[in-house]
Image (cartoon, rainbow, N blue to C red):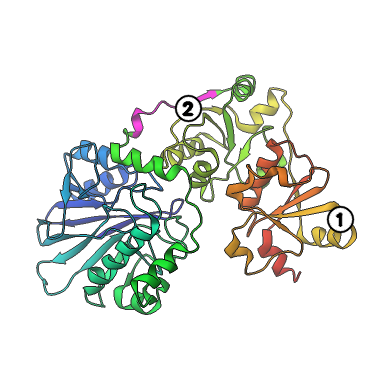
Amino acid sequence: MEPFFLGCLSHASYLVSSDGVAAVIDPQRDVDVYLEAADQKGLEIRHVIETHLHADFVSGHRELAERTGARIYLGDGSRAAFPHSSVRDGDSIQFGNCRLDFMQTPGHSLESICIVLTDLDEPSRPRALFTGDTLFVGDVGRPDLSHRRTPQELAALLYTSLHEKILKLPDETEFFPAHRAGSLCGRQMGPECSSTLGKERKVNYALQARSCHEFVDLLTGSFLPHPEYFSRDVELNRQGAVPLNHLAPAAPVRAAEFSRMQLDGAVAIDTRPTVQFAAAHVPGSIHIGLTGQYASWAARLLGLDQRIMLVAEDADRVRESRQRLARVGIEKVEAYLDGGISGWIADNYTPDVMRQMPVNELATLLNQQESQITVLDVRESGEADAGAIRKSVRIPLGQLAARTGELDPSKLIVVHCKSAYRSSIATSILRRAGFREIANLTGGYDAWKAAGN
């Protein structure tokens, strides 16, 4: 078994093989990684398995099946529009010494399945369990993504799936989920790539519930609203996304055309590091650094239908940016700034700048001019519960564009998050909304706390 992990989406997929035959579980959209791995190992990919219709990324199941001739498997009730096999409890596929047994485990979604891997040379115990978004390390899947069932109904189904199916397997069973920490499909999953059922039985907060009623209350009491693009990604996956090479390439354009396209409604995303964006950027551009959860934030803040233009350091980063956007369903990447910000300046266009403020400067200003400053905290509520800068205003980043009216533009707004990634995004949103007196707190709350404030 070979895992593949996309850090930008906290997404894990797997290639399972035996006797020259392979199955891919929960593939990412850009499927060349599996084809290259199979070619290197002399494998034929015959099976593509989705544990469910994913909401937080676009899967490559359709393209992978078309390029290999493999069969796609989904849990019964998916209503998928492409050729596939609907699987139920007791169904299985076998190749070489490997048998994959399917379990229907509704809860995160109605069609969710888990897959038990058995080595037929040692059939007395499972070799591994692939849990998709049903069970994570330290967490379980969120139950609020269905239009057909309430979160309470799904949570009750998830409780049954966990306790009457998954946890009936031996405690030593090692399981591999589809996500790790950072995914929006849970709320406190761990960073580990796997765990055992016995360990999770002891430490996973969701498995400590003593009854189905308590479990439902626990899971449905404090979930953050899911991003709007989640439902769109589910439908894209239900239809099967088009191959990546069918998407129109982004065109290089000079500053004059770039500016004209902005006036025509296209949004410029600057993907460079924070320091570079702060020093010089295209006025009106949104800063979402490629180093973080770039595609997820782009989809949350801009949706999937926005016309996009890119500002990056070089052509390689333009390609990476476009690919990562496609992984979440953003396909209208029309252009990129030829020559980057240097090209903008060379064409005699004036760049904008963004003030960066060290924590010691903020501490001094708060002591001397507190009434003239707004400290804006764009972290989530759970983060702020662990500590916050005094008298700060909290508006989570995902809500900021809709709540700029709550801020006083006559004051200096100093924005912070945990480490300054999200706050840089926030400053660009505020500048685009017309705010001029803005600063990004260098190092974020981590630096503020480390300085002893």
Residue wearing tag 2 = 250
Q: Which residue is mark 1?
A: 371
Residue 109 in magenta stretch = no
Is residue 28 visible to the viewer in this orientation of the structure? yes
Coordinates of residue 350 in the picture (x, y in percent): 74, 28
What residue sits 43% from the left and 32% below the top? 331
Query: In the image, what residue occupies the spot 77% across and 49% down?
Result: 413
Amino acid type shown at disc 1? Ser
Find residue 128 and name its label.
Answer: none
Label 2 is placed on what type of residue? Ala
Query: Is the residue 255 above or below the residue 275 in the image?
Result: above
Where residue 322 sits in the image (x, y, percent)?
A: 46, 36
Q: Give the residue drawn at x 20%, y 64%.
A: 116
Q: Which residue occupies the foreground of this view, 20 or 440?
A: 440
Q: Is residue 45 above or below residue 450?
A: above
Above or below, 275 against 309 in this view is below
Q: Earlier in the sequence, mark 1 or mark 2?
A: 2
Q: On the image, which quarter does residue 378 sit in?
A: bottom right
* Horizontal and vertical percent position of residue 409: 79, 42
* Residue placed most toward the observer, 392 or 313: 392
Instruction: Using the rendered view, name the quadrant where residue 264 is placed.
Output: top right
Question: What residue range appears in magenta?
Answer: 244-252
Classify 31 as above or below 332.
Answer: below
Seen in the image, is 60 located left or right of residue 419?
left
Q: Look at the numbered disc 1 and give the secondary structure of its residue.
A: helix
Q: Residues within 10 Å of mark 2 (few under 14, many from 20)?
A: some
Residue 133 appears in the rendering = no
Report which quarter residue 207 is drawn in: bottom left
SS assignment at label 2: loop
